[in-house]
């Protein structure tokens, strides 16, 4: 007899951890949308933010103060990256920029650990992880909280992009950087802001992931979880990042529970990639990505 | 980007062949006799294996323009394939194991290269990442690959060829040197042929290449195949000549990045750059640890070393991409041109690069 | 093919024997060209578009286009930006699949032209935004124009078998020939990426001509080059027809150059063909004047060829 309740539990667990993937993927999308850069350093930024925050708190800095300080540092990082890496590489092919972000991720990871050490830090953000029993299905409270945070962040972004002047200028830059330049939008300022925003997203994701896994080096590897999400959802769609994250989360858990035992387990390391790539063969621009028109 | 033909063109065929001759005498004759075991064991043999892997990745990334983040997977496939061939078909000579292992790696490479036919841009990077995770998982998960070692560790057999065994440091170095030399020469010939031009054409303007009649499917898959073949052979050298005991964890994502960084630092689309970059990657940590210990003493422990290494390598990548995308090899060529001017020998300008 | 160095080519215009390239051509290739020449009395068009329509997401880019191109003529397609010229070229070269209609190349008729086999059908094209291979030398760029003729597999190329070497020698000779023809000798070893725009236009033309195409499609060949370079390029285009025997279709919005260079001109506006005829006919066509010439008269005086 197939256990449907268990299936639902696995599915819900998968969807909720998928929210965490979405959160990381959104950081990518924000940057990709406006500058065409696939920022491999997003994971390193996440690690850096979480590590900075935890270390400040451990050194006796008050919680809100540490929060503000970390935010300030992420802003400085965003502006610094624009100055030191993006500006000199403007108009270079996307592949060059991608490789530059690989280098950037090494620098940030190295700096984070040189600064704050390599040991694992526990991070308690005050949310208990006691499962809730909802109609016989057990759901982690922490996951629900994470989902709520991700949800409000996404709503915030949507409003920001649609309503504020800066947000509109982001969309202009995303649509056509040259035209945006022509009408006097300052690309450099927009990029600096975008990287700052991505840094803040990384911080939020870092807090949630750090609270779950402990703040340590492997935190930067969540970048690898986000890539299949982007492939599935499209590199330039926030909605895609969310739906893609949910799907990948669910697929991963389902595969792990139902397919894993058949091949000896541990398949969550690559199952998402295989699914995403297979999907791509059917729909090359992803679920929500803009259709690529082949220009001669 | 550097085209190979430029080398001889710039310096003149005579000067170039003298240089190559001298290098060959030193590499094959002087070093095995006069070099220390440490030099050959810990520096030159890993240098050769990494250089060959970088040559392979350069075919794919530098020449054909497909970024790969999964080099370590093909490195591992080569090593484990050769191990199993030796174990299960003991009649085969080791050299044949090496070549067949290359073909196994090529086959896996072609499979993971398939998505790049439909998709451009970052997708090859993602599909090669999939290779990275899948291969590492499979090698750990299935005991068959490591003859049922619980953690997937394999002990490589002693190197032998035509009745001679190459177990000493000098022997393993010479074996590697011979393999790398032959493989590099063959790669050079391929890149100078129409196939090599096709690679660059696909990289520089895929649609134009298609219109001209370059078979895109065949060209891209060939790039994946040749690249993985070379990286696979390099993996055999890494496992059999250098480490001799390897585990799947040694072929992790960091190794893939290391090989990618070699070609970025050394110079994309330059085989000489692959060697220069590999030399840098091997020597740099040794230098850094000496320097750190001398300057900071006890504070400079292995953790600090590793982190500062990451920072410097990462910063170098960015610096090279910004200031000299053609890498160390461009600096080297400029340096040689300057020497040439000072000694009064007329030289072509380095514009063709 | 090798023998046909520019110096010894007969100067009798468009009637250069296309079969010159026979030794290197595939069978289909030879058959194609032979067929084009045959047809007693009536000349088979090299290219014929019938009833081509194409739309992108509901917006019509091309509507019911008919176009015939005769052997040996220089045929221009002009029109304002957005008139559908580029779409037309992309349909002919198979980058776009038309919603309706057929494209006839020689004796073959296609609903969707197979881009990958274009070169084998003797058709080559250039691109508006330059599609040279920046990492290759000028000579290697030109050699790329013969890529479809290298039938030796990569292992043979590595080993340098007699077949591979023979093909290589033949191709190099053909490349040298075109390099001389287009005055690119001094820069043939330079990487294309280091050359100025005007020169790259010539490199792209050389890459197109090296295969001795029966049909040459030029995508805005005069865009972005100086007046002097325009004059020079126009001469090269005419020579390409006169000496290499290529039939030429060029799309352009610079009317001045086109009127002097072309045998027949078709005019597109909003995806429709509004006129087709000799330059004089088109010039005096009221619809054309209304749609296009009126606004572009300045261009016309720019270059009197």
Image (cartoon, coloured by chain):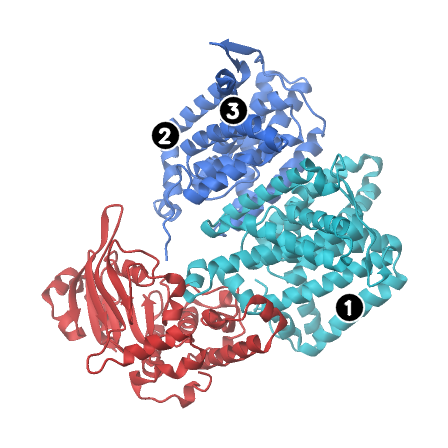
Chain colours: A blue, B cyan, C red
Can residue A31 be seen here? The reply is: no
The mark closer to the camera, 2 or 1, is 1
Outermost residue to the left: C286
Q: Name the residue under label 2.
A: A164
Subunit of label 2: A
- Front residue (pair C54, B149): B149
Q: Mark 3 points at which residue?
A: A14
In percent of the image, x 61 and y 26: which residue is there?
Answer: A50
Vertical placement of residue B238 versus B96, above or below: above
Residue C247, position as x, y percentages in the image: 30, 75
Pointers 2 and 3 in contact (CB under 8 A)? no
Residue B317, position as x, y percentages in the image: 63, 49
What is the spatial separation of the Cα atoms under label 3 and label 1, in whole angstroms?
58 Å
In percent of the image, x 65 and y 25: which residue is there?
Answer: A215
- Neighbor class of circle 1 (other Cα within 10 Å; few <14, some 14-19, many 20+) is few
Subunit of label 3: A
Asked whether the residues under marks 2 and 3 belong to the same chain, the reply is yes
Vertical placement of residue A45 versus A144, above or below: below
- Front residue (pair B159, C58): B159
In percent of the image, x 49 and y 22: which residue is there?
Answer: A11
Q: Name the residue under label 1.
A: B23
Secondary structure of residue under mark 1: helix
Can residue A269 be seen here? The reply is: yes
Q: Is residue A225 left or right of residue B239?
A: left
Residue B46, position as x, y percentages in the image: 77, 52
């Amino acid at each position: 007899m197939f256990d449907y309740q268990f299936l639902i539990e696995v599915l819900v667990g998968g969807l909720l951890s998928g929210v965490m993937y979405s959160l990381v993927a959104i950081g990518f999308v924000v940057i990709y949308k406006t500058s065409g850069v696939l920022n491999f350093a997003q994971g390193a930024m996440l690690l850096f933010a979480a590590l900075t925050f935890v270390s400040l708190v451990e050194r006796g800095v008050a919680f809100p103060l540490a929060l503000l300080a970390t935010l300030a540092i992420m802003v400085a990082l965003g502006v610094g990256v624009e100055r030191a890496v993006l500006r000199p590489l403007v108009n270079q092919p996307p592949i060059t920029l991608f490789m530059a972000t690989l280098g950037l991720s090494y620098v940030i990871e190295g700096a984070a650990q040189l600064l704050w050490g390599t040991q694992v830090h526990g991070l308690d953000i005050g949310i208990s992880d006691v499962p809730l029993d909802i109609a016989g299905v057990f759901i982690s409270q922490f996951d629900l909280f994470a989902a709520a945070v991700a949800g409000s962040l996404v709503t915030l972004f949507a409003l920001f992009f649609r309503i504020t002047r800066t947000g509109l200028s982001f969309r202009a830059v995303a649509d056509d950087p040259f035209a945006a330049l022509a009408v006097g939008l300052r690309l450099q300022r927009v990029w600096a802001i975008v990287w700052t925003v991505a840094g803040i997203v990384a911080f939020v994701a870092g807090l949630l992931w750090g609270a779950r896994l402990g703040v340590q080096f492997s935190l930067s590897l969540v970048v690898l979880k986000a890539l299949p999400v982007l492939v599935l959802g499209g590199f330039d769609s926030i909605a895609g990042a969310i739906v893609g994250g949910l799907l990948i989360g669910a697929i991963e858990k389902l595969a792990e529970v139902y397919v894993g035992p058949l091949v000896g387990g541990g398949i969550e390391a690559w199952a998402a990639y295989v699914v995403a790539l297979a999907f791509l063969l059917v729909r090359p621009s992803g679920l929500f990505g803009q259709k690529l028109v082949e220009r001669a | 980007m550097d085209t190979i033909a430029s080398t001889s063109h710039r310096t003149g065929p005579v000067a170039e062949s003298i240089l190559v001759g001298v290098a060959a005498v030193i590499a094959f004759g002087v070093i095995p006799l006069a070099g220390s075991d440490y030099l050959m064991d810990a520096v030159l043999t890993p240098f050769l294996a990494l250089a060959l892997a970088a040559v392979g990745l350069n075919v794919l990334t530098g020449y054909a323009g497909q970024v790969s983040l999964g080099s370590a997977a093909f490195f591992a496939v080569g090593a484990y394939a050769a191990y199993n061939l030796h174990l299960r078909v003991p009649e085969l000579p080791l050299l044949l194991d090496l070549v067949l292992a290359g073909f196994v790696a090529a086959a896996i490479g072609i499979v993971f290269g398939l998505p790049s036919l439909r998709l451009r841009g970052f997708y090859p990077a993602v599909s090669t990442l999939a290779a990275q995770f899948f291969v590492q998982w499979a090698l750990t998960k299935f005991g068959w690959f490591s003859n049922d070692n619980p953690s997937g560790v394999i002990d490589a057999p002693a190197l032998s060829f035509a009745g001679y065994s190459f177990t000493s440091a000098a022997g393993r170095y010479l074996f590697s040197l011979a393999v790398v030399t032959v493989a590099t020469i063959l790669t050079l010939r391929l890149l100078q042929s129409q196939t090599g031009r096709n690679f660059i054409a696909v990289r520089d303007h895929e649609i134009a290449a298609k219109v001209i009649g370059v078979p895109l499917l065949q060209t891209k898959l060939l790039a994946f195949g040749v690249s993985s073949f070379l990286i696979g052979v390099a993996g055999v050298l890494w496992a059999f000549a250098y480490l001799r005991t390897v585990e799947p964890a040694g072929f992790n994502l960091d190794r893939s990045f290391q090989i990618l960084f070699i070609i970025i630092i050394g110079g994309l689309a330059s085989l000489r750059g692959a060697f220069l970059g590999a030399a840098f990657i091997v020597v740099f940590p040794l230098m850094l640890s000496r320097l750190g210990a001398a300057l900071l003493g006890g504070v400079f422990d292995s953790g600090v070393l590793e982190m500062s290494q990451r920072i410097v390598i990462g910063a170098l990548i960015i610096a090279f991409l910004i200031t000299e995308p053609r890498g160390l090899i461009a600096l080297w060529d400029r340096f040689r041109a300057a020497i040439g001017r000072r000694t009064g020998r007329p030289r072509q300008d380095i514009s063709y690069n | 093919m090798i023998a046909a160095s520019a110096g010894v080519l007969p100067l009798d215009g468009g009637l250069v024997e296309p079969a010159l390239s026979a030794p290197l051509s595939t069978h289909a290739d030879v058959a194609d060209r032979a067929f084009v020449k045959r047809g007693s009395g009536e000349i088979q068009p090299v290219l014929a578009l019938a009833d081509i329509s194409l739309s992108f997401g509901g917006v019509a880019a091309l509507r019911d286009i008919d176009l015939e191109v005769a052997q040996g003529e220089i045929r221009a397609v002009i029109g304002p930006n957005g008139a559908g010229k580029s779409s037309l070229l992309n349909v002919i070269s198979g980058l776009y699949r038309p919603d309706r209609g057929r494209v006839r190349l020689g004796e073959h008729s296609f609903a969707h032209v197979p881009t990958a086999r274009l070169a084998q059908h003797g058709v080559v094209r250039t691109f508006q935004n330059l599609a040279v291979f920046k990492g290759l030398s000028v000579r290697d760029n030109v050699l790329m124009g013969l890529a479809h003729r290298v039938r030796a597999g990569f292992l043979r190329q590595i080993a340098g078998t007699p077949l591979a070497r023979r093909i290589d020698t033949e191709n190099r000779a053909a490349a040298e020939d075109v390099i001389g023809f287009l005055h690119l000798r001094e820069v043939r070893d330079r990487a294309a990426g280091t050359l100025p725009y005007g020169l790259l236009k010539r490199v792209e033309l050389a890459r197109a001509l090296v295969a001795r195409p029966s049909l040459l499609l030029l995508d805005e060949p005069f865009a972005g080059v100086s007046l002097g370079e325009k004059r020079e390029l126009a001469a090269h285009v005419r020579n390409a027809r006169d000496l290499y025997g290529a039939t030429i279709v060029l799309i352009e919005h610079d009317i001045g150059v086109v009127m002097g260079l072309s045998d027949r001109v078709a005019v597109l506006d909003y995806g429709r063909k509004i006129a087709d005829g000799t330059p004089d006919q088109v010039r005096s066509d009221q619809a054309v004047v209304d749609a296009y010439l009126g606004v572009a008269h300045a261009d016309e005086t720019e270059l009197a060829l």
